[in-house]
Amino acid sequence: MKLFYLRVVCSPMDESVLRLMLKYLFIFLFIVLWQISFAQPVTEQLLNSNWQFRKVGDKEWLPATVPGTVHTDLLANKKIPDPFLETNEKDLQWIEDADWEYETAFSIDSTFFNQSFCEIEFSGLDTYAKVFLNNSLILNADNMFRWWKADCKKYLKIGENLLFIRFESAVMKAKVLAKQLPYTLPGDDKVFTRKAQYQFGWDWAPRFVTCGIWREVKLIAYPQVRIENIKIVADELSNSKAMISVHAEFSGKPSASEIHFSVYNKNDKRQRMLAETIINAAGHASLNFEIKNPQLWQCNGIGNPYLYEFVFEVSEETKNILDREEIKFGLRTIELVQENDSHGKSFYFKLNRNPVFMKGANWIPADNFLPRVSKGKYLELLVNAKEANMNMLRVWGGGVYEDDYFYSLCDSLGILVWQDFMFACAMYPGDSDFVKNVSEEVKDNIKRLRNHPCIALWCGNNEIDEGWKNWGWKEQLECLEKDSIKIYDDYKNLFRKIIPDIVKDVDSTRAYWESSPSIGWGHKESLEQGNSHYWGVWWGMEPFSAYEKKTGRFMSEYGFQGMPSLSTFRKFCGEKDLTLISDAVKNHQKHPAGYETIQKYLERDYKQPKDFESYIYVSQVMQAEGIKKAIEAHRMAKPRCMGTLYWQLNDCWPVTSWSSMDYYNKPKALQYAVKKAYTKYFICAEINDSNLVVNVISDDTTNVDAIFRIRLTDFTGNILWRDSGKVTPDRKGSAAFYPLLLEDMLRDISEYRVFFRMELLLNGKVVSENVRYFLKPKDLLFDKPQIQYSIASASPEIYSLTLFTNSLAKNVFLDFGDESISLSDNYFDLFPKEQKVILVFSDASVEALKEKIKIKSLVDSY
């Protein structure tokens, strides 16, 4: 109208001005329309805001957070006390029995509404949920691990829309399902729910059976097609070329017009197109392309975890981009090798056709309330794993398939993942509905994760086959013979047919392993083939020395408990409760005989600590020494043993457990011990009969020449005997190269006051250092060391802490209380008459660090 008005009133002299204005207006409109034509038409709207919730039957609605859980929402509204404090867990069990409702209102305009297709997508609903959009039921969910989506265009309206979800109690639902079976399944009612099993309580986890919208909610609209899933496979891989095939699935109606699917290599600055094809009428497309002289993805300690960045685009003939996705992909081969040999049958991984000794830990969910696991927490835990020289983590089957960010971090850090499917320590139903539900769950998660180079193995379950055969389940439940046959037939159908068939169909590039472990630790065959969970130490009360004899082909579980730090205890209980007999401390120990077991092992090897703080410290030192002994035994058994994954890296709440990092990501003594025991080049000693034998191990891909230095030293620093020389660690195995007769070495020397020290040097740098004592710690005769220290600034937020002692200080602990710091080393042996420099990473001042620091050694705990 304004243009028309201008045209009428302008005089003939102004027509040139008008023409110029119209010209520029036309150019402007053309640019805008041109930009719109190349805009990405797939539209997404997050629906994570403005939620409220209530217990079914209540009138009051309360603000809710999405992603979140009902427990954290109740806590945020001050309706319950902190579930992790003291014994509050016991008073909050009512939450699991209730049904809960969540709702939000959101608005859309005509631009969004006029798209041809519209879906609502839930990345995670926990667990039994009915979803209503504008009072119409659009979805029934019954699996926490699946991605749920529903077509919703016909239910939407321009303006405000109401999304409502009712969650049914998983506990009550499970009881109903359990009653439908004529027999009882081992594992209680929880086995009927496709839900994180640890939420029902574990020997390191509290019982918080929660519900809620635990991952993002999206509204997705598009006019023609959108990318549903992409599968990338390296069909052929060598140093000279990589032949890549891509298969993609699409939503929508690609047959409406000719739709192109193309891939670009973002690593190439020229944005070179690698391949292009047409999407077929069924909504599928396949591509093949070649990369010359590819850079391979390598794991931590071996090489660079190089990632290609592939850009996939869907476009019309006009090059109108309809959808776009970027995927980081690592080119590598991974094989599980099982071959008969002189020891039984091998079990090891080849990465890029090279055998790799796997060093790592087991991973559990990092919080009982999963949406609280931030990217920062993932990053800190995984960086600590990398810095501890780990190259593999096992995602345990009683938790969850982790967030995409977890696997992306593992990709970039070079940490391989042994991925369990989510079944643990129980027998599961075998009815058609359950099997169908699980089948979709397995497909969803394999499709989501298969492009991550970190995924090394799909494993069916944790400890189910062993439990059925060795733990007396049938006898405990008094199963009839026909019921026992049915239960185990259902097991075999799920884990030997259904799941492996899906793996083969959806991701044939990786091996499938039925159950971890393959044989129970009480059988000698468990040390000759398959993977082992060795629990003779701890559960079987065997001494730590048992690790030296009980070494299998791949040790995927073993462990010992250590208490969290005193500062962690103070976060969940008051000063008056800092005792082993307080209810608060006992509630944060979920093993039924946990503290009793720690005490029995402590009495074997250590003197009784003088107070609670010292007890914490000694428990950590004992845990570290025990697991270090296991790792040494496993590494010295290379290549017969080709993997060691201790239980466990992390915690889901503040608790006394087997972890090396506590709930607040505070490293225990074990984390520092593991860092030294997992180095690429490693030196250690074992006692065989009457000999002390020095071993060197290399996990390099080539043999290298090194220097060894060994010495026998007394506790005041006098060197009683020494030697050095050249050694070539064999990358294929452990080399026992220096036997010493103990009787000769210790003649006329008090074994109560000496230690054997070993160093391995490469290019003049110490790459591994170790110590061997000849008696248990409680029998060693320590002097009271006089430890001196100084702190100086090395660079911004990095300080050098220099220590010196006149006499051996064993297991020196540097404690800064609640101060947020990171240390290059801790719980170390400080050798007499030598300086040791520790790097302290902190934003505190020198004065603050000096005020906070406490230094203690083992002798100070008695």
Image (cartoon, helix red, strand yellow):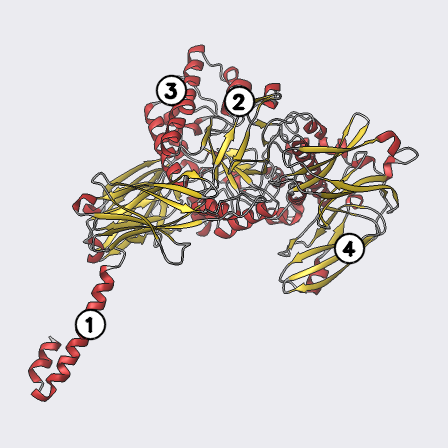
Observer-side mark, 2 or 1, equals: 1
Observer-side mark, 4 or 3, equals: 4
Query: What number is the disc on residue 249?
Result: none
Tell me whether circle 1 and circle 4 mark residues in contact (CB < 8 Å). Answer: no
Tell me whether circle 2 and circle 4 mark residues in contact (CB < 8 Å). Answer: no
Which circle's residue, 4 or 3, is located before the other in the chain?
3
How far apart are labels 1 and 4 at the CA level?
A: 73 Å
Tell me whether circle 3 and circle 1 mark residues in contact (CB < 8 Å). Answer: no
Quarter occupied by residue 242: top left
- Quadrant location of the N terminus in the rendered image: bottom left
Specify the amino acid type for callout 4: Leu
Furthest-front residue in this view: 240
How far apart are labels 2 and 4 at the CA level?
A: 49 Å
Residue 462, visible in the rendered structure: yes
**Residue that mark 1 sits on:** 27
Specify the amino acid type for callout 3: Leu
* In-front residue for pair 380/693: 693
Query: What number is the disc on residue 181?
Result: 3
Furthest-right residue in this view: 748
Query: What number is the disc on residue 466?
Result: 2
On the image, the x and y values in percent for residue 463 come to 52, 26
